[in-house]
Image (cartoon, rainbow, N blue to C red):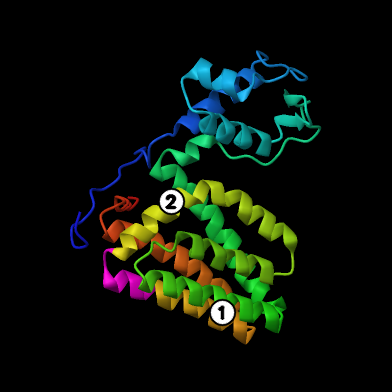
Amino acid sequence: MSPSTPAAPVRAGGRLGRETLADRLAALLSAQIADGALAPGDRLPTEAQLAAAHGVSRSVVREAVHRIKSRGLLLSRQGSGVYVAQPPPHRPLEFDPTVLDSVDAVVHVVEVRQVLEGAMAGLAAARATKTQVTGLKRALAALDVAVAAGRDGVEEDMAFHRAIASATGNPQFSLLLGFLEQYLREGMRITRGNEARRLDFMEAVRKEHHLIVDAIAAGDAAAARRAAARHLLHGRRRLERGGVLEAPAPARRRA
């Protein structure tokens, strides 16, 4: 696809990408834990056994097990193996995994991010130290360099928003944003891929990022909140204009 070729619209419920083998194996093992086929205290089969049983490589098994461990469902015992963990006393924050599957669901999570990042930018403007502002400018410069070099800039964009979270002085924002990234990464790839096809989109994004940083550096909380919220809102509009996402139908006026 050339840079000038419009992408086909992704309709409601459209898939964002292929499900990987690690995704499938992680989902299967998680389901076995949920329905009791693998009970707390049970030892998980070895990497080699799981690989043979499911026809996948050991690296796929490691990735799947790592994902389940990160959710607190498995634990490792030195020299013994991997075991099913006891259910946690408090249920961890978790979104429906189908947010990875459809554009509509990703938009819902982006709305959460829009509220979150507007608040973070406002707090960062009120609280950021000179060192944190310097770090934020450095992260923005790294993003600009990545884009100028023709890279997608996803990791640099993530790092930029993490720098804003850090500048709030509240570590919970960094933890929450880190949690959301697993659901937003694929959506960000789509967004940035769409923006890379048009110079006007790329320039608009660059200006929006700089407005956020300028407001934070100036200590203007209201302007920072507005700039962050507009950045995410305009990102969705660019998806619609680029033909990646269908524009919502006009609302009918009530009689």
Q: Is residue 70 above or below residue 154?
A: above
Instruction: Find residue 120 and report its horizontal and vertical position in percent.
Output: 63, 67
Whether residue 223 is visible: no
Instruction: Find residue 211 and report its horizontal and vertical position in percent.
Output: 49, 79
> Going by the image, does 141 lie left or right of 6?
right
Residue neighbourhood size for the residue with mark 1, other residues' Cα within 10 Å, grouped as few (<14), some (14–19), many (≥20): some
Residue at the location (34% across, 58% down)? 193
Of the numbered discs in the image, which one, if any, rests on residue 137? 1
| Residue 20 occupies quadrant | top left
Point out the residue furthest to the bottom here. Answer: 218
| Magenta run includes residue 130 | no
Residues in magenta, as a range: 197-204
Q: CA distance from mark 2 to mark 1?
A: 24 Å
Asked if marks 2 and 1 touch (Cβ < 8 Å), the reply is no
Residue at the location (54% across, 83% down)? 214
Instruction: Find residue 233 and report its horizontal and vertical position in percent.
Output: 43, 63
Element marked by disc 2: helix
Instruction: Find residue 208 and report its horizontal and vertical position in percent.
Output: 44, 75
Q: Main secondary structure of the magenta part?
A: helix
Residue at the location (68% across, 14% down)? 36
Whether residue 18 is visible: yes
Mark count: 2
Q: Quadrant of the N terminus?
A: bottom left
Along the line of sight, which residue is nearer the eye, 209 or 56? 56
Point out the residue furthest to the top here. Answer: 37
Element marked by disc 1: helix
Along the line of sight, which residue is nearer the eye, 84 or 51? 51
Q: Which residue is mark 2?
A: 187
Going by the numbered disc 1, the residue's amino acid type is Lys
Sequence-earlier tag: 2 or 1: 1
> Going by the image, does 81 lie left or right of 121?
right
Along the line of sight, which residue is nearer the eye, 159 or 195? 159
